Image: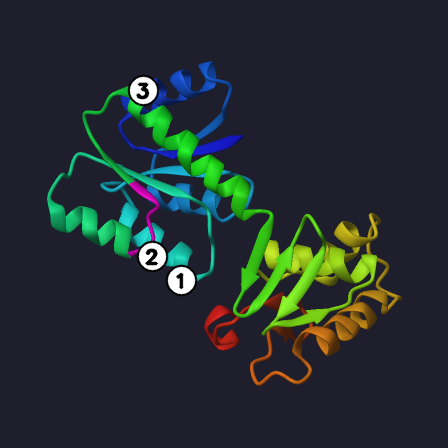
Amino acid sequence: MRILVVEDEQKVARFLKRGLEAEGYRVETAADGKSGETLARSNTFDLAILDVVLPRKNGFEILRDLRNEGHKLPVLMLTARSATEDIVSGLDLGADDYLTKPFAFDELLARIRLLLRRQVQSRTRLTVGDLVLDTISHEAVRGGKKIELTSREYKMLEIFMRNPGKLLSRADLAREVWGYDFDPGTNVVDVYVNHLRKKVDQGFEIRLLQTARGKGYFITDRSPASLL
C-alpha cells in the first residue's frame, strides 16, 4: 500500500515516513500544498495524510479541488487545529477522517488500517452516477438495467470508472486495454469507445462517456465543461 504524506514540518514528516515504512507501507512525502496536490492527482496512492496548514496551498483547498475533480483518494486530515468548526469543514469537504496533533502513533495506524480496508472494499464496486461495475463478477448495471460487455469493453469501462473525470488519451486506452503502444493509424480505440457508449449511454438522458475532441475520452456524471 502506498501512502502520501503532505506535511511541511520536517520532523513530523520524517517521523511519519520512518514509522509507516517500518509497518510495511511505501511512503512518499511532500513539503508544500502544490507539490502534494500534484502527487495526489497521480492516482498512484492508496491513502493521503494531509496537513491543513501548508505553504503555497492549504490542505482544505487541496481537498476541495481533488473532490471537485472527482478524485476519491481516501484522505486523513492531520492538523494542530482542534476547533469543531475546522473538523466539520474538513469532513464537509470530503475528508475521510481527522486526527489532531499531538497524536498517538498507534491511533494513527488504526485509522489508516480502517481507511485502507474501506478502500479495498470500494475497489470491487465502482460507481459513476447510476452506473455500477462489479470488478469481481464483471457485471455492469445502469439504472437497474444489466449491460452485456465483451472482455475488451469491460476492461475499457473499468479503466474509465477507476479514473472518473480524468481525461484518457487514445494512447492511454490502447496501452491499458491491448497492452501495446498506440498506432495513430488505427481507429480501434474509437470503435470500442463507440460500442461502449451505445451500451452505457443509449436510452439514458445523461451521457456518462464524454469526448474531448482531439484529446481523448473521459467518464463523468457531472458537467463535462467544468472538467476541461
Amino acid type, label 1 = Asn
Q: Name the residue: 46% across, 52% down.
A: 72
Numbered label attached to residue 68: 1
Residue 155 spot, x, y in % from top left: 75, 55
Q: For residue 164, what is the image quadrant?
A: bottom right
Residue 73 spot, x, y in % from top left: 46, 47
Q: CA distance from mark 3 to mark 1?
A: 32 Å
Q: Name the residue: 62% across, 71% down.
A: 142
Magenta segment range? 93-97
Residue 164 appears in the picture as rendered:
no
Residue 21 spot, x, y in % from top left: 46, 18
Dot 1 and dot 2 residues touching (CB under 8 Å): yes
Residues 146 and 209: in front is 146
Residue named by callout 2: 64
Question: Looking at the image, is mark 3 or mark 1 earlier in the sequence?
Answer: 1
Q: Pick out the residue farthest to the right.
A: 185
Q: Which of pointers 3 and 1 indicates the residue nearer the eye?
A: 3
Callout 3: SS: helix
How many residues crowd around disc 2 within 10 Å: few (fewer than 14), some, or many (20 or more)?
some
Q: Which of pointers 3 and 2 indicates the residue nearer the eye?
A: 3
Dot 3 and dot 2 residues touching (CB under 8 Å): no
Residue named by callout 3: 106
Q: Name the residue: 64% across, 67% down.
A: 141
- 83 relative to 203 in the view: left or right: left
Question: Looking at the image, is mark 3 or mark 2 earlier in the sequence?
Answer: 2
Callout 1: SS: helix
Numbered label attached to residue 47: none
